Image: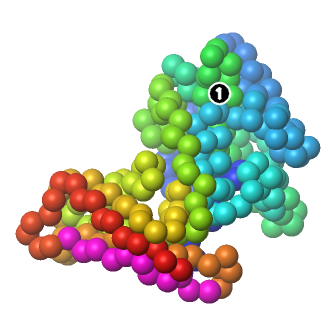
Amino acid sequence: MAAMRPSLTLTFILLLAAWPLSPVVQAQENGEALRGVLEAAYGRWRDAIIRKDPVGWASSITRYRQTKIRNEIVSELRSFPEAVFSADLQPPPLTGLRHLEAEAAGVTAHLVYYGKVDMGQDRELLKDNLLKLRFYQEAGVWKYDSNRIISLDSVPEVRTEIVAGRRPEFLDSPEYTPPGTMPPPPPLCRVPEFKAGYKLQSFGYEAILSAGGCEHAPVQDSLEQQVLIGGLVKGRNEIRLKIRPGKVPDGEKPALQIRIYLLPNDSNLQGREVLRWQAPEGSVPAEVTLPFDVNP
C-alpha cells in the first residue's frame, strides 16, 4: 500500500485558482476592527508555534482543530504535543502581504491576503498567491483555526488584476464565505497499539467509515486513502460503514470497497492488509459492522 497522506500540523492547504474577477469593495470600518482582532489571534498562534510553546498553542487554536491534530498525531504513533512543533514548514508572517478582506458571519470569520506567502521556503521560489486564514469564536474569543494557500500559477491574469486593484470574485461565493457556525470538536480517539491506514473506494454511494468511536469524512464518488484515526489494537477490532446510495457518475459502475492495513513506521515499506470487504452487487446494507483480529 502506498504511504498515507501526512497530517498537516500547520494545516496549510494548496489550491488552484481559476475564477473571474469583480471590482474591489472598500473595507468598512467594522471590517478594519475585525481585521485587527483576527490578526492578533493569528499572531498569538504563530508566536506559540515559533516558540514551541504547547500551552500557548493550545490556548490560541480552536478546540476543534486542536483535537483533530491531536487525533492525527497519536494515530501515527507520534508524541503529542511535541509533534505539533516538528513540521518543517513555518507559519508565514503577514508583513509584506496585501490585505484583501476581513469578513465574519456568526462565530466564524476569515482574513484574505495577497502576496508572497513565506513558510520558510527558498525566497527565490516564492510567488504571489492568496492566503486565507480561518477563525472561530469560542466563549466570545476569536481563535485561529486553519488556512488555505490559493495558487495563482494557472491564472496569471488574476495576479495582474489584483495588482490593478481588483479581487477574485469567488471570495463572494458561498464556498468562500464564513459558514456562520462551527462544528463541534470530534471525540478524543484512543491511543492505538498499531498505526493503520484505510483505502475506501466509493462510487455511486456516500460511505462514512468509523473506528473506535471516531468518524472519518464521508467518501462519495472517489477513492480515499488515509491514516485510520485511532489506529488498531491487538486482538479484536471493528470497522463500521454507514452507506447511502447516490447517483452513479457517468461512465462508472457502482462500487464500494474498504481495505484496512497495518502500517510500518518506515513509510518506504508496504503495509499489510488485515481486512478487505466489498459490497455485494444489488444488495448494499445501510450500515455494516466488520469485526477482525489483529495478531502481528
Residue 135 vs residue 160, the one in the foreground: 135
Q: Report the amino acid beneath label 1.
A: Ala
Residue 89 placement (x, y as % from top left):
79, 58
Residue at screen point 61% across, 42% down = 67
Residue at screen point 70% across, 53% down = 9
Give the answer, above or below, for where 141 lies relative to 96.
above
* Quarter-of-image position of residue 193: bottom right
Q: How is the image coloured?
A: rainbow
Spot the residue most to the left: 282
Judged by its main secondary structure, the magenta piece is strand
Residue 290 vs residue 48, the one in the foreground: 290
Residue at screen point 20% across, 70% down = 279
Give the answer, above or below, for where 271 lies relative to 287.
below
Residue 18 placement (x, y as % from top left):
51, 56
Q: Is residue 161 visible?
A: no
Can residue 278 be found in the magenta stretch?
yes
Q: Is residue 239 visible?
A: yes
Residue at screen point 41% across, 72% down = 293
Spot the residue most to the bottom: 269
Give the answer, above or below, for where 263 lies relative to 23.
below
* Quarter-of-image position of residue 31: top right
Residue 143 vs residue 272, the one in the foreground: 272
Dot 1: few (<14), some (14–19), or many (≥20) neighbours within 10 Å? many
**What span is colored magenta in the figure?**
269-279
Can residue 220 be found in the magenta stretch?
no
Give the answer, above or below, for where 99 lies relative to 85.
above
Secondary structure found at label 1: strand
Residue 78 placement (x, y as % from top left):
71, 61
Instruction: Find disc 1 in the rendering and name its residue.
Output: 102
Residue 6 vs residue 251, the one in the foreground: 6
